[in-house]
Amino acid sequence: MPSSADNAKHPIATDPTVVVRDVHVRYRSPSSDASAMRAVSPGTRAFLRVTGQRPKVTVDALKGVSLVARAGESIGILGRNGSGKSTLLRIIAGLETPRAGTVRARSTPVLLGVNAALVPDLPGERNVLLGCLAMGLSKGRAQEVLPEVVELAGIGKAIYRPMKTYSSGMASRLRFAIAAAANPDILLIDEALSTGDAAFKERSERKMTELREAAGTVFLVSHAAQTIEEMCSRAIWLMEGEIIGDGPGPEIAHDYRWWSWNITKNELAKADEILARCRRKWAPREPVISDPELYKRQTRHAS
C-alpha cells in the first residue's frame, strides 16, 4: 500500500488543474558584486562607471521545475528569498514566459492582487466592485457578494476610505477577499495571509477550504512556514530555483522551519544534515498523469 508521503507526491485520484513541465526562467539583473565588475571588459567597465550603471549577471530563477497540481489541493510554496517562489506563481498565472518548458491549466488562474484592477484613489467599496467585474462577475453579482467580501476582509469602516490610506496588510486582506469572491478554480496567493489577525486567518482558512471542496486548487506562497503547516495539504520546498521537497504540507513545513531555525542560529552543520535528509525523504519524482491527453491541452506559454 502506498505511503501518505507517496500519495501527497503522486495523487492520481483527482483531476489535474495545473501541469508545469520542465520550466526554466532566467533573468539578467544588475549586481553590485565587485567580481561582476571585474568580469566585464575594460571598455564596458569604463562605460558603466561613467554612466553610474552596474554590470548585469545571469540569474536562473527556476531550473527545470515540474509539478502537477490537482483538484482539492492547497499547495504551499516554501523557500528563502530568491528561491523562485513568486516567479513560479507568475509563470503559472501567465504573467511571464519561461525560457523553456510549458505550463497548462484547466482554467485561468487568479493571482491575488494582479487580476483585481484596483484604484488607489477610490474607496475600498468601489474597488471591490471593480475587482469583481475585472474577474468576470456581472454587475448584479458583484453587488451581491459585496457584503461577503467586506466581512472576509475584516477592515471595518476603512472599506469606505480610499485604498491609498490602507496599510499594506489591509490592502492584502481586501485583495484576497476580492479574489476569493469569484470562487476561482485556481487561486494563487502571494504572502497575503500572513498580514491579518487570528480572526482573519480563521476566515481565510475557511474560504480556502470552500474552494478546495469545490474541486479547486489553491497555491499559497508564504515566508511563514507555520501558515503553510496549518493551512496546506501539500507543500513544495524551493531552493535556488529547484524543487528539493514535495510532500504533505505539515511535514514539509515542519522540516523547513527546523532547517531555517538552525540556519538562523548559525548551526550550519546541523542545517546541512536536515537539508540532506529532507532531499532524500521528499525528493520530487516524475508526476503521474493518468490522462496523456492532458499534455495536449492549450498551454499558458510557448516553449
Image (tube, rainbow, N blue to C red):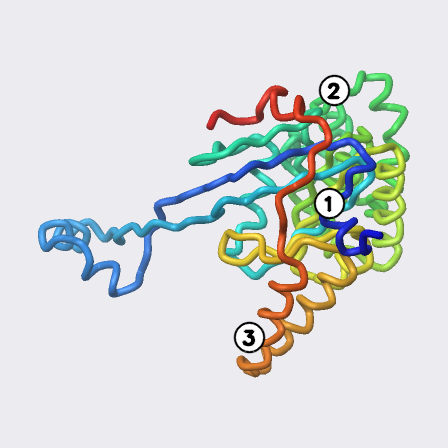
Vertical side of 82 occupied by 187: above or below:
above
- Residue situated in front as seen by the camera: 290 or 231: 290
Marker disc for residue 262: none
The secondary element bearing badge 3 is classed as helix
**Residue located at (82% from left, 32% from top):** 181
How many other residues sit within 10 Å of disc 1, few (<14), some (14-19) or many (≥20)?
A: many
Q: Amino acid at mark 2?
A: Gly
Q: Position of residue 187 (x, y in %)?
A: 73, 37
Foreground mark, 1 or 3, reads 1
How many other residues sit within 10 Å of disc 2, few (<14), some (14-19) or many (≥20)?
A: few
Task: Calculate the distance from the C-alpha at mark 2 to the C-alpha at mark 3.
Answer: 48 Å
- Residue situated in front as seen by the camera: 16 or 28: 16
Q: Amino acid at mark 3?
A: Asp
Q: Is residue 294 left or right of residue 271?
A: right
Foreground mark, 2 or 1, reads 1
Task: Calculate the distance from the C-alpha at mark 1 to the C-alpha at mark 3.
Answer: 27 Å
Q: Extreme left residue here?
A: 43
User: Which residue lies under the disc numbered 3?
Assistant: 272
The answer to whether marks 2 and 3 mark residues whose Cβ atoms lie closer than 8 Å is: no
How many other residues sit within 10 Å of disc 3, few (<14), some (14-19) or many (≥20)?
A: some
User: Which residue lies under the disc numbered 1?
Assistant: 10
Q: Position of residue 26 (x, y in %)?
A: 41, 43
Marker disc for residue 136: 2
**Residue located at (73% from left, 31% from top):** 290
Instruction: Examine the image and state in which quarter residue 178 appears.
Output: top right
Instruction: Examine the image and state in which quarter residue 149 appears.
Output: top right
Q: Amino acid at mark 1?
A: His
**Residue located at (45% from left, 35% from top):** 100
Vertical side of 120 occupied by 130: above or below:
above
Q: Position of residue 70 (x, y in %)?
A: 75, 37
